[in-house]
Image (cartoon, coloured by chain):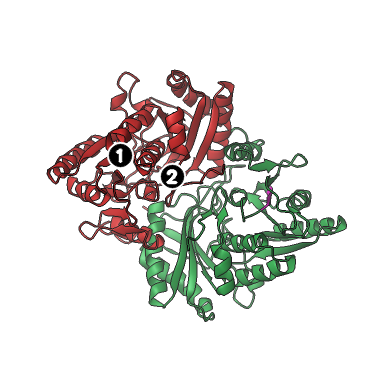
Chain colours: A red, B green
């Protein structure tokens, strides 16, 4: 394994130290638990926003701490949910007196540990709502959508819930809006070459030289189909087919798009993919209000990408436009 | 070759179309030359800032077009300098009546084509200054530093020259400040695994499974030494040794740092590397004013990274602090 690390034992602590060093004191490590980072500036009376999940997907999740964004993060081991203790500490750091909403990908370990942490927090009189993110359409049908996994759509759902919190909305309202964002955020991914688990040097899946995995999960979970590599246009068309049916159920015509790289897929390819998806959206009469292109939700040096489309309604459009400022995502103030 | 493209013939046009689609009309493609992109908003009387180089290093260079940043870009073929015609058109689009400064990596093809373009522009009565960027300390000694290649230090030099232009400084002053930034910007890179040229599927260099190339150039140019993979701490220490002598010649104690990924090196690794470099800087009594961590100057899916350190003086510190806003680099307005 050719990774530039010190030891597997210190991997996550070294990584967090390097991240914190770049943030010049605006993001702080909890004295009580080194796996909890939080935003220095507090806003009394605001709903707290906790995010978290396993490590290895950087810049998710800690890269989303910031102004009008997440208040704290619970950091797990590589590809492993944060412990209930860690989540509880993240909840305490995010708590600003109006309850706390926790957002995380919908994986069994995360769901369990965030649930336990929420119960522990309630014992300490902090009201907590959990919102597992469920954007990966390849992982379950529309009927079973609460079983879907969370992938790069995390970005949009977290951004909007954090915007709701920053506007002073109640915990209940933040949760409602989060459910709305969750339902309208649809992603599909493709795996092209595996990434390597830095703890053991093992590839997270195997593929032949001319094969790709359609609908692959970010931990190498099997997709819908193993198939031959296609040109960008055909591949993106096939991906769009997996999204458009559900997308068409919403009457609104404005969308936001994220073309997310899983690690080693080049920006060149992501731009080419964006060109294809924008043409398809346009053909369907959908207008893209904003596009994010980059490596947000990765799996080490895995090659592949996902396309996320969120169908905006008025509420989501307003929340998405709220300025935000975090190490890995910046949203400009809209000039009137 | 497993890249998600349509055809090699349309590669660059597809990429530029996908980039432009995400920029919602703020960055525009020249009607006269599709390889020239420019910022929509003009500022009459400001020095124009042109950047450019070969494709394949995305998000460089077009990702640096924006407010208080580059005005236009000349886009070359994969790993190939833009043609003089393309550079000339980029100069014309950047010209706002006060002359134009062109910044590009110091490679023979780029130097030649930008020189020819400058001469052609002078014939059309546009005054042009060229500033080849020379930050890679592995590529030539201090005495021969004008022969050094440009790598990720491009970011800081371009950012500061563009800030000077946005402050209304003259072409001559922008050029002087650019030379200052150039001299004080020092980088060193390490190659860990090759990237693939998307035009022919060929790897840009070869390395054994346990080897790295110390001082490798971004096109796979040979480095200073081929060596065994080292733990992060030892490797970064060795890299710092290559920078610190020259760094110590400046009396000022403030620096800015860029930890740049070359393509498939994970953010996890880049944060770990930053942790090491920050400790070394601190031990030398140097204070890091700002840190950029990410994939700015890449070579497709090449694994590896570079460390750039710029020694700030008062002038550079002020230029660096000027707010800037481009697709791949954002600098916040400093709150007083």
**What is the chief secondary structure element of the magenta stretch?**
strand
Instruction: Judge left or right: residue A13 versus residue A330.
Output: left
Q: Work out whether B233 lies above or below A178.
A: below
Q: Residue at x 14, y 46 (%)?
A: A124
**Front in this rendered view, residue A265 or A241:** A241
Residue A259: percent from left, percent from top: 49, 37
Distance between the Cα atoms at labels 1 and 2?
Answer: 23 Å
Instruction: Judge left or right: residue B17 versus residue B100.
Output: left
**Front in this rendered view, residue A112 or A95:** A95
Viewer-side label of 1, 2: 1
Instruction: Judge left or right: residue A188 versus residue A94.
Output: right
> Where, quadrant-wise, is the C terminus of chain A in this rendering?
top right
**Front in this rendered view, residue B208 or B333:** B333
Q: Residue B68 occupies which quadrant of the picture?
A: bottom right
Instruction: Give the residue number, with chain letter if any, for mark 1.
Output: A103
Q: Residue at x 57, y 55 (%)?
A: B324
Residue A31: percent from left, percent from top: 23, 61
**What is the secondary structure assignment of the residue under circle 1?**
strand
Instruction: Give the residue number, with chain letter if any, for mark 2.
Output: A263
Q: Work out whether B319 lies above or below B303.
A: below
Can see residue A237? yes
Q: Which residues are magenta?
A: B71-75
Residue B185: percent from left, percent from top: 56, 69
Q: Residue B129 occupies which quadrant of the picture?
A: bottom right
Residue B110: percent from left, percent from top: 70, 57
**Front in this rendered view, residue B72 or A139:** B72
Instruction: Judge left or right: residue A207 versus residue A126.
Output: right
- Furthest residue to the right? B123
């Amino acid at each position: 394994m050719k990774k530039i690390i010190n030891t597997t034992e210190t991997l996550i602590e070294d990584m967090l130290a390097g991240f914190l060093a770049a943030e010049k004191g605006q993001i702080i490590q909890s004295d009580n638990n080194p796996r909890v980072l939080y935003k220095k500036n507090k806003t009394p009376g605001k709903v707290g926003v906790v995010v978290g999940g396993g490590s290895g997907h950087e810049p998710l999740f800690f890269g989303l701490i910031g102004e009008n964004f997440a208040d704290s993060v619970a950091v797990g081991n590589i590809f492993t949910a944060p412990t209930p203790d860690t989540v509880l500490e993240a909840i305490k750091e995010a708590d600003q007196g109006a309850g706390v909403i926790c957002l995380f990908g919908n994986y069994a370990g995360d769901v369990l540990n965030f649930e336990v942490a929420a119960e522990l927090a309630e014992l300490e009189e902090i009201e907590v709502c959990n919102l597992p993110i469920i954007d990966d359409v390849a992982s379950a049908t529309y009927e079973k959508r609460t079983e879907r996994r969370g992938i790069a759509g995390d970005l949009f759902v977290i951004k909007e819930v954090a915007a709701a919190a920053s506007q002073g909305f109640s915990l209940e309202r933040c949760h409602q809006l989060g459910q709305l964002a969750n339902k309208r955020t649809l992603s599909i991914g493709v795996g092209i070459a595996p990434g390597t688990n830095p703890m053991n040097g093992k590839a997270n899946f195997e593929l032949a030289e001319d094969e790709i995995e359609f609908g692959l999960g970010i931990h190498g979970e099997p997709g819908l189909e193993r198939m031959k590599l296609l040109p960008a246009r055909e591949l993106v068309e096939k991906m769009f087919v997996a999204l458009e049916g559900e997308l068409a159920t919403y009457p609104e015509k404005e969308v936001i798009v994220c073309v997310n790289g899983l690690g080693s897929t080049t920006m060149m390819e992501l731009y080419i993919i964006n060109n294809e998806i924008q043409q398809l959206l346009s053909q369907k009469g959908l207008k893209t209000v904003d596009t994010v292109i980059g490596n947000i939700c990765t799996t080490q040096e895995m090659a592949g990408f996902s396309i996320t489309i969120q169908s905006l309604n008025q509420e989501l459009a307003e929340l998405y436009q709220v300025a935000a400022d975090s190490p890995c995502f910046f949203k400009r103030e809209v000039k009137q």
